[in-house]
Image: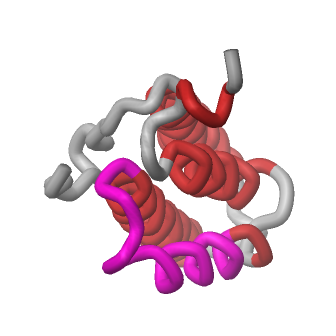
């Protein structure tokens, strides 16, 4: 069987969106976010429903990841700055609870995209139209 005929419409774009989301968190922050934004703006209106859903989820989750990172940095600065003894507490809590949760959600999103299914990120996700 041909893999092209077995895939859902927009599945390749959905997988690319989820992979870019994970790469933004793990490998190349910023660069992969820009690539994700490019993909989003290219397919946000005319792309298949599956692609639009995963693109919206990953862009919103990426923006929330950035907001959370700013909040953690603000807490560090309010808690005495980067030279404070509390800095490691904030960093460890963020990476243990926050960053790893975002990665886990991205892995589930990637698995759903690879299966050709829509998926909404819990708490961070937005409603999909398809």
- The one nearer the camera, 120 or 28, is 120
Can residue 8 be seen in the rendering of this structure? yes
Residue 19 within the segment the image draws in magenta: no
Image quarter where the N terminus lies is top right
Q: Quadrant of residue 127?
A: bottom left
For the residue pair 37 and 75, the one nearer the viewer reads as: 37
Q: Residue at x 46, y 75 (%)?
A: 43
- State the image quarter where residue 46 is shown: bottom left
From the viewer's perspective, is residue 120 above or below residue 86? above
Give the number of marks: 0
* Image quadrant where residue 121 sits: top left
Seen at 31% across and 37% down, the residue is 119
> Is the stretch drawn in magenta largely helix, strand or loop?
helix
For the question of whether residue 80 can be seen, the reply is no
What is the magenta range?
33-50
Above or below — where is 4 with respect to 65?
above
Relative placement, left or right, of 86 versus 51 is: right
Above or below, 69 against 99 in this view is below
Q: Nearer the viewer, residue 29 or 53?
A: 53
Does the magenta portion include 47?
A: yes
In the picture, measured across the screen, residue 113 lies left or right of residue 82, that is left
Instruction: Give the residue drawn at x 58%, y 74%.
Output: 39
Q: Residue 8, image x and y in percent?
A: 45, 37
Figure colour scheme: secondary structure
């Amino acid at each position: 069987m041909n893999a092209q005929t077995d895939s859902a419409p927009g599945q390749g774009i959905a997988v690319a969106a989820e992979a870019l989301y994970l790469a933004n968190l793990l490998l190349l922050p910023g660069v992969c976010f820009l690539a994700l934004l490019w993909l989003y703006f290219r397919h946000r209106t005319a792309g298949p429903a599956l692609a639009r859903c995963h693109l919206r989820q990953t862009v919103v989750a990426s923006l929330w990841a950035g907001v959370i990172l700013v909040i953690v940095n603000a807490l560090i600065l309010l808690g005495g700055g980067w030279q404070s003894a509390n800095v490691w507490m904030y960093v460890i809590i963020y990476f243990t609870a926050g960053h790893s949760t975002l990665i886990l959600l991205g892995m589930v999103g990637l698995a759903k995209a690879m299966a050709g299914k829509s998926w909404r990120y819990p708490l961070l996700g937005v409603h999909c139209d398809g």
